[in-house]
Image (cartoon, grey):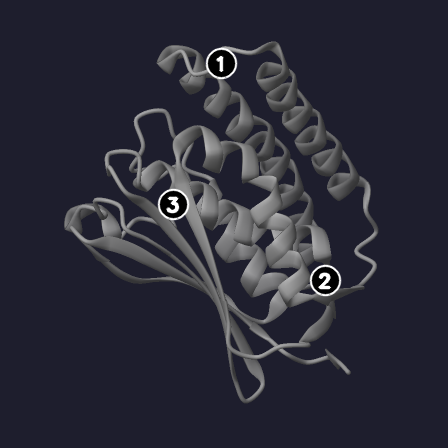
Amino acid sequence: VEQKNILSHELLSVSAIIHDIANPLTFIMGEKEKSKFRRRDEVMESLESITVQIDGARRRFNQKEKPEVIDIEDLIDEVIREFEFRSMADRVQIEKVISTYGISILGDKIRFRQIITNLVANSFDAVQRRKSKVIKIEFVCDNDVGTIIVSDNGTGIERGKRRDLFKLHSTTKVNGNGIGLFIARECARLLFDGDVRLLTSSSDGTSFSFSFSLNPLVR
């Protein structure tokens, strides 16, 4: 069982590297097509984003799974800052709702952040056809379980595609690789005693949840 878990972690790491590098590259290519890069500093900022993603992927692959203190609200703020340029470029409003403050846990901070980043990136893709684009990141607690809910006002996921969302290589995107949600769910289950689920999806938008154990809770 231990060897199986080690192998699962390594496979997730390799897949994560591919996914994390592909995400910013896909965004930049899309921006090129839409001719939004009109200033050299904007291009450089996006290239810097790729460098950060690659470095993070490299560190994740080499990391020895040492648990870190994860301040939930601070980490959500980090993710929002990571998408700051894209939110301005695409005119997306990101809202943050925290129901319980001062919650920290011990765990793999890089992978925890990766799960949230994946869900937010998917929401950015989902709202592209909307004139008014809104993404909400909410954190709630229920006893010993924490939940981060990422919602958007996008066009929703087709009913026929919802069942296979978390299967490897299943994607709803034209240029998707179908590994993002698979990695997110596997990381949540293997590393945080939690899960990633599709809560709702309709023509008014979509909501995903990332639930995780609050044990060990850092006080």
Q: In this view, does 155 lie above or below 137?
A: above
Residue occupied by mark 2: 2
Kindly indicate whether the residue at mark 3 contacts the one at mark 2 (C-beta within 8 angstroms).
Answer: no
Q: What residue type is labelled 3?
A: Ser
Disc sitting over residue 138 in the figure: none
Query: 87 above or below 214?
Result: above
Which mark is first along the chain, 3 or 2?
2
Residue depicted at x 30% and y 40%: 127
Q: Distance between the residues labelled 1 and 2?
A: 48 Å
Local crowd at mark 1 within 10 Å, few (<14), some, or many (≥20)?
Answer: some
Mark 1: secondary structure: loop
Query: Is label 1 or label 2 in front?
Result: 1
The quarter of the displayed image where residue 13 is located: top right
Instruction: Please state which of residues 102 and 172 is positioned toward the viewer in this rendering.
Output: 102
Identify the residue at image location x=64%, y=28%: 49
Number of other residues with Cα within 10 Å of mark 3, as a class: few under 14, some 14 to 19, many 20 or more: many
On screen, residue 37 versus residue 55, left or right, reads left
Residue linked to disc 3: 123
Whole-number angstrom distance, CA of label 1 to CA of label 3: 22 Å
Find residue 119 and report its horizontal and vertical position in percent: 46, 50
Name the residue tied to disc 1: 37
Give amino acid for label 1: Phe
